[in-house]
Image: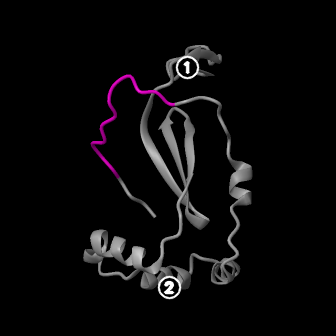
Amino acid sequence: MRYSIPIESKDGKEILHWEIYNSLTVGLAPKGMVVVWMNGQNKVEIGRYQARELSRKEANEVYKAHFKSSGDMPEAVVEKELLSREVPPEVREIIKQGKINCKQWDDYRLRYNWKVGFNKPLVMYHHYIGF
């Protein structure tokens, strides 16, 4: 339940109504930050999660188990992305120096004091990965 203008509203007034969400978005940010949102008429953050850095041995095991068929070694992917014209030179330099800061990302986040509940089991029947 949330206060907003429902899609079927005739007068455009904000009321308390059931909001329907039909997909999830997962966003990746610097330093292993992962944020998950529900999408519907509105986009609402479910949570922010923090990955941990893997040792080289752990990373190689994950790579062998999940990504070997892609043909790209992790180092090659990083280097290819850094050389991309889409990454501004000043950002490349920050990445190379290891000085990426997530503070600005956290400052823009909207926090909600509620928990997600589903009225039936959540089943993923379609997924899309975009870059």
Residue range highlighted in magenta: 116-127
Question: Magenta region's main secondary structure?
Answer: loop
Looking at the image, residue 46 sits to the left or right of residue 105; the answer is left
Identified at 28% across, 70% down, the residue is: 65
Disc 2 secondary structure class: helix
Identified at 30% across, 68% down, the residue is: 66
Identified at 55% across, 19% down, the residue is: 1
Q: Where 46 sits versus 34, above or below?
A: above
Looking at the image, residue 75 sits to the left or right of residue 67; the answer is right
Looking at the image, residue 97 sits to the left or right of residue 24; the answer is right
Q: Position of residue 125 (x, y in %)?
A: 27, 42
Residue highlighted by disc 1: 1
Residue highlighted by disc 2: 79
- For the residue carrying disc 1, how many other residues have a C-alpha within 10 Å: few (<14), some (14-19), or many (20+)? few
The answer for how far apart the CA atoms under marks 1 and 2 are is 46 Å
At label 2, which amino acid type do we have? Glu
Q: Position of residue 57 (x, y in %)?
A: 41, 79
